[in-house]
Image: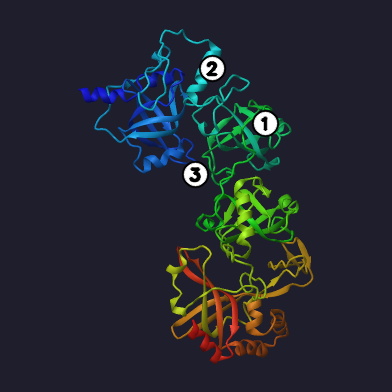
Amino acid sequence: KSKKKMAQKRLTGGAVKAMAAGQDVPQPVLQVIDIKQIQAPTAQPGAAERFRLVVSDGIHFQQAMLATQLNVLVKGGTLASKCIVKLTDYICNTVQNRKIVIVLNLDVVSPPLDANIGNPTYLDASAVDAAPTPAQAPAPARPQNNNNNNPRPQPQQQQQTQRGAQRGGAASGGFAADGQAIIPIKGLNPYQNRWAIKARVVTKGEVRTWKNDRSEGSLFKIDLLDKDDGEISCTFFNNACETFFPKIEEGRIYVFSGGSVKFANKRYATVKSNDYEITMDSNSSVTPCDEVDDIPEISYHFVNIGDIADRKRDDMVDVLGIILNVGEVENFVSKAGTPLCKRVVWLGDQSRHKIELTLWGDKANNYNANEDGVLSAKGVKVSDFRGHSLSALRNSVIQLNPNVEAARKLQTWYANEGCGADFKSLSQLDTGGYGGAGGGERKTWNAARKYIAEIREDEISDTNAGVTYAVRGLLVYIKHDFNGSQPWYPACPRTDPKPCNKKVVLQGGQWYCSNCQADYPNPAQRYILSLKASDHTGSTWLTGFNEIGDSILAQKASELQRLVDAGDEKEFQEVFRRALFTRYEFIIRATLAKFDQGGEHAQTRVKCTIVKATKVQDFVQASHGLLRE
């Protein structure tokens, strides 16, 4: 019995009732008597798991919701039923006339006990108004004023007290114009009816419109940051878009209230660090806050470039890098006919890796920096096409030589030792023979030597970029058919400012390119070869693009097209015959590809694309090279 009383003294007696009454209970110590996983109410794809707690002070118990960033405590077994916790940060909300504690942060002060402490009962809402100030747990708590004879506070006093309870004893956040207490962004959740936040507008997007069979309207988005490093995306639709777009300025601080908090659609979310987003309507409030505040202009969570190789496609990251190379602006037309422009910038850092960052639109046109400077990019998307690369979005923030300590350290490292570093590329360089690119002499390949039979699926499955191999083989067959499908295609002839190379179609006597939205009198012909190479261990199919075809067949595709047009099948066949049974040193990129099996499950196979093909002419020298390897 004495042990039970001692255990009960460890809890902050009366805390549950006091929190429900809106009183300030700094860091209450409670027992978790139940944990249950619940489904997100919107059943939105990608929504985070949620856990409901039942917490007790030994006298009363009530429900609580665990912030999603604390889910790891439950999954790891640190937070479990019957354990004792100290709530270091929380808010208390009313949901359907019931008080619910939203736990933002906690410390586990004791592992699970054998039983519940005391005989707690459910807190009846009718008993909340008369809640006394709780007796604070002895160890980690600060002294409390236990005067229970104070009358119920007047409205102004009550608001101030409630503000303290919402933050779990944190510093004052102030009030919105309607008297609502300001809470941190990290305290927002879909179960709140009323809330207010004070935050800086980090980015402001342009007005976008949509129209379909079901609806039409307009919207714009902003990304917000508060002094507690909380970030969230906020969207204004239709009337709210029209009302607030001219009033909100990027970089200024505002108090926001009156919107709805919902689960974010991770597919379109610009702030990946928050599971929620805000939707504002015409009844929402946005009030400028011009007093000096400690909200930073921007908050970075930099990822080392070398670690981006472990990120998934469409992940959002912040990156900081030395500018190694800056490409020219490239203008082109999308398949939908929209004029676009882009610029590629290569970044490197202390991980001795480099990566390609693509800037679009105004970000590409307005870029003005030389190499060796420092560039920071917030909220850029990871792509796994041809390795790993980064792409700036509408709401991405690009800064040159940002005023942050990490940038100064990176600049110092580069000046002292990094300028002579050999940076390993995460992005596949635009190299000859692969994807129809250039002449194949612009990159020195570090490829593993393999026999054909050693190219296995299990070695390739761990990387989206594929694996590069060096293979020596005999060219034994090239697919071709004089009267049927040819190993080339009609391509767009545009070469300025950059070759298009997209397939064109014959329409009304002209060759039309959907990418350039233009007609041409004659197309260019570009190879896409399918050939088989063999060595003493086996054979494999290889794909070779235009420059590879020029090299192997020693004829341009346009010249073979003229043979077909002239009906000269004999010379046509002779071109392919002369190319066979020649030994080549192939540099190939092996990737996994899925092939449809006519209604059955797709089959995964290894696809090998020729990056470079060099004819073996001096066999003595080639043999010495193999011995050195």
Return the residue nearer the eye: 9 or 138: 138
Cβ atoms under marks 2 and 1 closer than 8 Å: no
Tell me what residue is drawn at x 59 percent, y 64 percent: 423
Residue at the extreme front: 416
Q: Are marks 2 and 3 in contact (CB under 8 Å)?
A: no
Q: Which kind of residue does numbered mark 3 sit on? A: Pro
Relative to 383, say whether 552 is above or below: below
Q: CA distance from mark 2 to mark 1?
A: 28 Å
Q: CA distance from mark 2 to mark 3?
A: 38 Å
Find the residue positioned furthest to the right: 521
The three-letter amino acid code for the residue at tag 1 is Ala
Residue for badge 2: 159
In the rendered image, residue 583, in percent from the top left (x then y), is placed at: 55, 87
Q: Which mark is residue 45?
A: 3
Q: Quadrant of residue 181?
A: top right
Which quarter of the rendered picture does the N terminus lie within?
top left
Residue at (27, 28) in percent of width and height: 116
Residue 569, how many percent across, how many down? 66, 88
Is the residue marked by circle 2 packed among few (<14), some (14-19), or many (20+) residues within 10 Å? some
Rendered image quadrant of residue 296: top right
For label 2, the SS is: helix
Read off the residue under disc 1.
240
User: Which one is earlier in the sequence, the residue at label 2 or at label 3?
Assistant: 3
Label 2 vs label 3, nearer the camera: 2
Crowdedness near tag 1: few (<14), some (14–19) or many (≥20) residues, C-alpha within 10 Å = many
